Amino acid sequence: MARRANTSGATVSRVLSGRTDIPILAETRARVLQAAAELGYTPNPAARALTNGKTGIIGLWMSLAYSKYRGQVLDTMRSMMQVIDFTFAVTDIDEEYHFVQTFDRALRVPLDGIIAFDTSYSVDAFTSKSNQLAPNIPFVSMGAYWSEERSYVGIDLRAGSEQAMAHLLSTGRRKIAYFAPSTSDLRAAGPRYEGYVAAMEAAGLAKQTLLPKTFSHRDIHDCLSAHVSMNRLPEALLCMNDEGALICARVLSKLGVEVGRDIALVGFDGIDETEYAETPITTVAQPYEEMCRLALDYLHAQINDPSHPLQQKLLVPQLIIRESSAP
Amino acid sequence: MARRANTSGATVSRVLSGRTDIPILAETRARVLQAAAELGYTPNPAARALTNGKTGIIGLWMSLAYSKYRGQVLDTMRSMMQVIDFTFAVTDIDEEYHFVQTFDRALRVPLDGIIAFDTSYSVDAFTSKSNQLAPNIPFVSMGAYWSEERSYVGIDLRAGSEQAMAHLLSTGRRKIAYFAPSTSDLRAAGPRYEGYVAAMEAAGLAKQTLLPKTFSHRDIHDCLSAHVSMNRLPEALLCMNDEGALICARVLSKLGVEVGRDIALVGFDGIDETEYAETPITTVAQPYEEMCRLALDYLHAQINDPSHPLQQKLLVPQLIIRESSAP
DNA sequence: CTGTTAGCGCCTTCAC
DNA sequence: GTGAAGGCGCTAACAG
């Protein structure tokens, strides 16, 4: 490349890095640019990263298994990255898989820092491993799971769950069931479930779970129609997430159960559709924009100053009450 | 690190690369592993990539602006990557932004190959630029846009659009409008629109567009309610995508218009919800699983053999007829 | 303004 | 089985 442009590697570097602080003869620059175009030459990013000691890349670690909430968070991160000069590389963290292998893979990408989003039930494995696997890379976790040993922007879903339960109880519901996929780790665990349990026990009520196999339309339908036909539907469902709640609402409506009157529904996350459903759905909305903004701030601080002290913050979700749980 | 383990860099490399072909004393191995754990040492991926000449990373270039269809594709790619030993780094290609800057950023990630998905209206800039920016990196585009100069797995949405129109026309619809966001580049362009135009002109019918500002619930509502109140609703809407069609259906239903009887609706993409909507929605389903599988195959072939000839294939979407366009 | 030199951290080759 | 040397492609520092 340098040869083709009749110049040295250093000059090529100066031109192609777009440096304005070093004066370069217009003619030389043109020669370099043309040679690059002819050869289809692009600087090797790995070599660049090695030399510079930084990559300009922030890794976003998350599960890419589809969910609307994750999509919204991704979208938010995307728009925030546009205004700062970092590339943002999303890598899939598969929680059902072998963690170590997953992390090994994620660490193949040379990074200036990592944001780990809702790395859910692998959180134990994750935080301890991430300490071991990448303790020197700036790291912030955000979402429902965190470790006190690392910087984080957490969302206190247990508090959110308790808000939701207080609302359901204060509007007279007594038979309240927790609704989650039986194949999920959140079946009978996690902050949402803990909030549910605490509230039911404090109220002296019997706990109950409704567990479709997954949150697919079919499974939810099968689960609910069985309960409807046996006339055993509870007075309220605390649904693990909004997508499940939305499907519930559609299914129940087709089964002749009126959401908001015959049964109350509450979801988690705060995705857009809850507002526009046939019957708008009450939801525990996660403050994900603030979460993203803070996580990026925290990470920035760590990147600029590797010895930056821990930054930890817990956000509280907001209960948005709508018709699906009308009094 | 080598010092801490009382050994040489070469041995550290042999241990940490997990090589089984080179015999290493169990004790030495243990010493290295422990030193690594104590120091929290991780091999520098950039240096590795530079030495090895490969990174084990495949870049997925796409817009991360949220859409359900993109989410499903991402999910499909994710599950396919699990079974092959590549990391998969998703980088946002912003089409509304300055292309060159976007590509510059995406190219900061050291990659063995690139899959570009639906890099839509930037396709011209994109393919020409990608030739210039990364002509030597194995590259496959997949989705609705492609360049004949590169390998691709395309989806012929124009053919899909014509199928949809043939169906609407054959079921007696005459006043058919094309429905897209006025702020989108697909407002009056792109393969979907071309198919619409061709069909209408062949049938000797007057073209018409309905253009809400965006595909948000509010904008669609404003657009449709205006038409309803003026009693000017067409007999059918060809909606640019399923998400828009689903919102249309909800809005129309609230406005007292019965979908499938008073008006026909057809969407594009084939997302799951179309099947479970109040009135199931007719859609031009994109064969995205096949698309992903082929794109990965093609890329693999190129990675393994840099001089592999071009591989190009055009897939045809499938029209799924449901109640929203019942005869 | 531009070329030369050295080193980033790793892995491969070749000795021992 | 293990260490020493060299080079991957780039850029900062230093000459000229």
Image (tube, coloured by chain):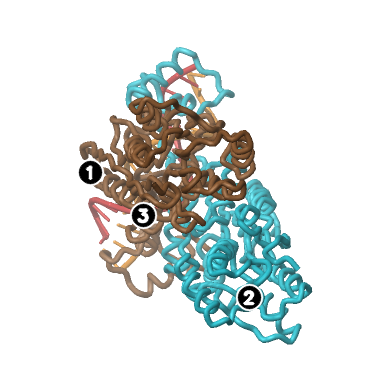
Chain colours: A cyan, B brown, C red, D orange
Camera sees residue A221: yes
Q: What residue type is labelled 3?
A: Phe
Residue plotted at (22% across, 38% down): B307
In the rendering, at what x and y percent does residue A108 appear? 43, 53
The subunit letter for the residue under badge 1 reads: B
Residue at far right of view: A170
Say which mark, if any, is on residue B305.
1
Residue plotted at (49% across, 14% down): A25
What's the CA distance linking mark 1 and mark 2? 52 Å
Q: Is residue B77 above or below residue A230?
A: above
What's the CA distance linking mark 3 and mark 1? 16 Å
Which is nearer the eye, B157 or D8?
B157
In the rendering, at what x and y percent does residue A75 appear? 57, 47
Q: For the residues carrying marks 1 and 2, which lies nearer the camera in this image?
A: 2
Which element carries disc 2, helix, strand or loop? helix
Q: Are marks 3 and 2 in contact (CB under 8 Å)?
A: no
The subunit letter for the residue under badge 3 reads: B
Say which mark, if any, is on residue B86.
3
What residue sits right under mark 2 in the picture?
Answer: A193
Which is nearer the eye, B26 or A150?
A150
Quadrant for the N terminus of chain A, please: top left
What's the CA distance linking mark 3 and mark 2? 36 Å
Q: In this view, does A282 lie to the left or right of A36?
A: right
Labels 3 and 2 positioned on one and the same chain: no
Q: In this view, does A230 lie above or below A35?
A: below
